[in-house]
Image: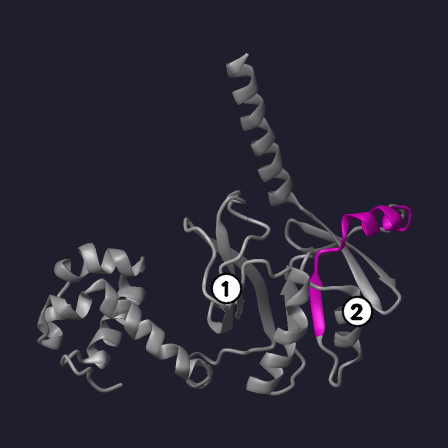
Amino acid sequence: MGCSREGTDWEHVLQTLVCYRLLDPGSEWRLHRVWFEQSAMGDLLAEDFSIAAKDTLYRCLDSLVEYKAELFEFLHQRWAALFGVKFDVLLYDLTSTYFESDPPFAEGDKRRFGHSRDKRSDCVQVVIALIITPEGLPLTYEVLSGNTADKTTLRTFVKKIEHQYGKANRIWLMDRGIPTEEVLAEMRASDPPIHYLVGTPRGRLTKLEAELLPLEWQKAKEGVDVKLLPREGELYVLARSNDRVAKERAMRRRQLGKTLDSA
């Protein structure tokens, strides 16, 4: 990455950021305020506190965006070689982060008002989409406009993964609010087919209830039973987990206890 005109060694800044993420992950602000001075990074790199200046840390991350695709491809190869990681199961989800700042913003700025997962509808936000493996290794991410609807993102990401890593018999795991029926049909018709596991909309579960009730429970593993209902090219799975039952009962007991205490 070279050095800046002021003499900042960007490779050392990047090494500091990576070590921080691996050893004691937190915000860049915390690295700047606390972690760097409590670590041996300065001695190891023969650098002073200037490489942990907050603006320097953010500029280093900004410069990496240009090489995002190449960086993910390199990591993909390393994970496969070192750990034998398979990339046939992908977990796809979206989150958001908000900003306490006031519009208007410059043209092209992604901060927008939208559905707030943080219950801060008064603040602008951006949406962050992430694809990871079951081992927690990220394959790609995108920062989207804050008013992006979840259901409009899946088609783009399926094509992005196929373009970057090639086509394969993958299984996508998603929340029920992410795919649309149109995109799911496209995934089933793909060559090779793209499989998925997604929560069934509650309205459809109500319609299937009469067909599910008479079916026998089958043991999937210890403590987990399932009912399987094939319909129109899809397989509906109704799961019953003993651990989940116990968790929900405990949650209701705690809530009941709070209600009785307040009364």
Evaluate whether residue 125 shows in this view.
yes
Query: Which residue: 11% across, 69% down?
Result: 42
Residue 72 drawn at (x, y percent): 45, 80
Name the residue nearer the viewer: 116 or 111. 111
Residue 220 drawn at (x, y percent): 70, 57
Classify mark 1: helix, strand or loop: loop
Q: Which residue is mark 1?
A: 110
Callouts 1 and 2 close, C-beta under 8 Å: no
Q: Looking at the image, which residue sits at the far top?
A: 263
Evaluate whether residue 82 shows in this view.
no
Looking at the rendered structure, the kind of residue marked 1 is Lys
Q: Residues within 10 Å of mark 2 (few under 14, many from 20)?
A: few
194 vs 20: above or below: below
Is residue 206 one of those drawn in magenta?
Answer: yes
User: Closer to the observer: label 1 or label 2?
Assistant: 1
Dot 1 or dot 2, earlier in sequence:
1
Residue 1 drawn at (x, y percent): 27, 85
263 vs 32: above or below: above
Looking at the rendered structure, the kind of residue marked 2 is Glu
Q: Is residue 213 left or right of residue 60?
A: right
The part of the chain drawn in magenta is: 195-211
Query: Which residue: 80% across, 79% down?
Result: 189
* Quarter residue 10 falls in: bottom left
Query: Which residue: 61% across, 74% down?
Result: 157
Q: Which residue is mark 2?
A: 182
Q: Residues within 10 Å of mark 1 (few under 14, many from 20)?
A: some
